[in-house]
Image (cartoon, rainbow, N blue to C red):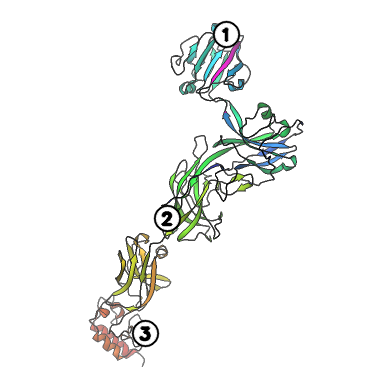
């Protein structure tokens, strides 16, 4: 298998149900400008179905700027449709100082936060007294302004055991990675993964019934703008709009679409900016969707052909799909054909992989025709075929490894500022189904004994079968066959089934690994085997008992060659010819053709057959 492609990396959201695209009025700079006009919006709404977008490396036809579709956008003022992703406001290694004080003996209160914290919201998950503290792994915290021995501070686990304490011995106080220090009016420590896993709350050890609050390991998050667009109110009447995506820091992961009146924006926004609290307060409606990242590579490749339905038609080099949250998404890869103009045929398929998840290499695609009347996906597949591989999302209970049929699952579409584009995670390539170089030459001839000659037999396959057949009721019945390796030579094939003599026979050459079963004379050639024939030639094959180059024939239709001398007439000279040639190979090797004694399963021709032929002549009309 050869390769001439690089992986195509795409960013995708699962396909939604509706992708109608409305008019788009994008600013040239991708910047949303705030105005001082007050908002008159009383209501507004949008939908953000799970859908697909692609990175700027997307190669379906031509590169395109990625985007997402936001549906059913409806409002009565000029508005911005903003797509964001969450990003933690604190990073591992940051240092945060928290001003924590008592409210009498009734509660704790956070009066401020500094250091790498941008606001109190970075350290508290809710407001008021005894707030839930955000204690995030990897952050060094200093709590200052503490009341000291009158209200000793303690951090505890879910069962109330002390982890860090100003009035006792906490289990993590001697951990060098935690680095606990206590100076009375301040304490400091670093939240390790082990400590984060056990932290459950904090309290005053003296007034634990009142001065107690919870903790969480979840960091406060900013909403970072991935893409945005502005629209006139007249454009937002319930249709769908496209928002270009320029900031990929949140891929893969959850994204949210927001509807915000332009007049209520707190500043001039561009992708990568963080949405301010004031702007967030002005959001009219929002909805979240999960964004996936995918990678798919269909390399140009050569396989043994012809390719039959049910066989492997191609291998996809890489097929990956992730959601950014550690959950592997189930999917399948379908292969689509192209028409004679090289255009994708999305409604037709040539095969599908099994159900997949996570990271996959060397994914086999099993050939399967769909729909049944497909014009461009007929089997067997030979020569060079242009194909398009696409990721389809598994939307039922199938498990990885389960078989999938072409078209069984919805394709992952993607959007750009130009609207919906078909494809999503996709790549195209060619599959060359090579038929082994093989040939035979088969001329008109007489059976010599039971043998016929097949001339100029050539095959590049390690092993091939030379098969001689005759037609019967629309089928090909095997008269004889031989197996071997051949290099432009004459091969003699014994005709062990003489049901077709005399008459047209065909010599075929087929690679033995493409035979659908173990064949013997008298068997019928199957359609899959017939489709794998490398070469064939038809000739007339007869029996010439007396060597006069005339074919013995059957003039009565009973299956016996009563016109032994082949002159076209049944007369006494035929009886004489059978008697004269009774011991010849041409007669003795074909007892079923000269069975005038009506023996069951004759294995020889005898004088009784000569007498039977004479009796038939006497009974024949003159």
On screen, residue 129 versus residue 471, left or right, reads right
Viewer-nearest residue: 247 or 550: 247
Say which of marks 2 and 3 sits in front.
2
**Disc 2 packing (10 Å; few <14; some 14–19; many ≥20):** some
Q: Residue sitting at 43 percent across and 16 percent down?
A: 176
Which of marks 2 and 1 precedes in the sequence? 1
Q: Which residues are magenta?
A: 88-102
Q: Measuring from the top left, give residue 141's x and y in whole percent.
A: 53, 17
Find the distance from the CA under tag 3 to the CA under tag 1: 123 Å
- Secondary structure of the residue carrying numbered label 2: strand
Answer above or below: position of 313 versus 51. below
Q: Measuring from the top left, give residue 219's x and y in whole percent.
A: 55, 25
On screen, residue 507 versus residue 160, left or right, reads left
For residue 147, the mark is: 1
Q: Main secondary structure of the magenta part?
A: strand
Answer above or below: position of 290 versus 141. below
Mark 1 and mark 2 in contact? Answer it, CB < 8 Å: no
Q: Which residue is mark 2?
A: 302
Q: Measuring from the top left, give residue 507's x and y in whole percent.
A: 36, 71
Find the distance from the CA under tag 1 to the CA under tag 2: 77 Å
Find the distance from the CA under tag 2 to the CA under tag 3: 55 Å
On screen, residue 330 versus residue 464, left or right, reads right
Q: Residue sitting at 30 percent across and 82 percent down?
A: 544
- Secondary structure of the residue carrying numbered label 3: loop
């Amino acid at each position: 298998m050869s390769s001439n492609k690089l992986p195509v990396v795409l960013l995708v959201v699962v396909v939604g149900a509706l992708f109608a695209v409305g008019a788009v009025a994008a600013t040239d700079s991708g910047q949303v400008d705030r105005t001082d006009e007050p908002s008159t919006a009383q209501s507004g709404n949008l939908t953000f179905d799970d859908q697909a977008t692609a990175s700027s490396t997307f190669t379906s036809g031509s590169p395109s700027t990625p985007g997402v579709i936001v549906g059913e956008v409806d409002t009565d003022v000029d508005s911005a449709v903003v797509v964001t992703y969450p990003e933690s406001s604190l990073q591992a290694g940051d240092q945060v100082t928290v001003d924590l004080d008592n409210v009498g003996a009734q509660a704790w209160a956070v009066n401020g936060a500094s250091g790498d914290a941008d606001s109190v919201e970075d350290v508290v998950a809710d407001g008021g007294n005894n707030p839930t503290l955000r204690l995030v792994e990897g952050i060094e915290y200093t709590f200052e302004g503490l009341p000291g021995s009158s209200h000793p501070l303690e951090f505890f686990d879910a069962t109330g055991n002390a982890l860090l304490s100003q009035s006792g011995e906490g289990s993590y106080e001697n951990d060098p990675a935690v680095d606990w220090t206590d100076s009375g009016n301040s304490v400091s420590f670093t939240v390790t993964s082990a400590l984060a896993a056990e932290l459950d709350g904090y309290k005053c050890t003296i007034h634990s019934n009142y001065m107690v609050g919870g903790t969480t390991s979840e960091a406060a998050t900013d909403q970072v703008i991935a893409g945005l667009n502005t629209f006139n109110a007249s454009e937002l009447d319930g249709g769908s709009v496209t928002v270009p995506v320029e900031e990929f820091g949140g891929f893969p992961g959850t994204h949210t679409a927001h509807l915000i009146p332009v007049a209520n924006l707190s500043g001039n926004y561009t992708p990568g900016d963080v949405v301010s609290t004031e702007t967030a307060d002005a959001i009219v409606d929002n909805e979240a969707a999960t964004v996936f990242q995918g990678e798919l590579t269909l390399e140009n490749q050569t396989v043994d052909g012809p390719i039959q339905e049910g066989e492997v038609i191609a291998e996809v080099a890489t097929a990956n799909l992730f959601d950014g949250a550690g959950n592997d998404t189930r999917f399948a890869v379908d292969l689509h054909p192209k028409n004679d103009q090289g255009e994708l045929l999305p409604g037709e398929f040539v095969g599908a992989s099994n159900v997949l998840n996570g990271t996959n290499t060397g994914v086999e695609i099993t050939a399967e025709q769909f729909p049944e009347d497909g014009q461009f996906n007929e089997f067997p597949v030979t020569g060079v075929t242009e194909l398009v591989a696409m990721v389809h999302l598994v939307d039922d209970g199938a498990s990885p490894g389960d078989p999938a049929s072409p078209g069984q699952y919805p394709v992952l579409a993607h959007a750009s500022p130009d609207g919906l584009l078909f494809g999503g995670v996709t790549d195209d390539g060619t599959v060359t189904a090579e038929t082994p170089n093989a040939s035979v030459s088969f001329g008109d001839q007489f059976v010599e004994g039971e043998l016929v000659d097949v001339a100029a037999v050539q095959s590049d396959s390690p092993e091939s079968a030379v098969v001689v057949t005759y037609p019967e009721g629309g089928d090909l019945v095997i008269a004889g066959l031989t197996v071997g390796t051949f290099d432009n030579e004459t091969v003699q094939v014994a005709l062990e089934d003489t049901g077709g003599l005399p008459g047209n026979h065909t010599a075929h050459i087929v690679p033995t690994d493409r035979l659908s079963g173990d064949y013997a004379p008298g068997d019928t050639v199957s359609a899959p085997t017939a489709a794998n024939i490398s070469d064939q030639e038809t000739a007339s094959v007869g029996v010439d008992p007396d060597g006069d180059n005339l074919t013995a024939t059957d003039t009565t239709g009973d299956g016996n060659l009563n016109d032994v001398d082949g002159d076209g007439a049944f007369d006494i000279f035929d009886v004489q010819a059978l008697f004269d040639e009774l011991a010849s190979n041409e007669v003795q090797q074909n007892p079923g053709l000269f069975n005038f004694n009506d023996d069951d399963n004759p294995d020889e021709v005898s004088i009784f057959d000569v007498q039977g032929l004479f009796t038939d002549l006497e009974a024949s009309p003159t």
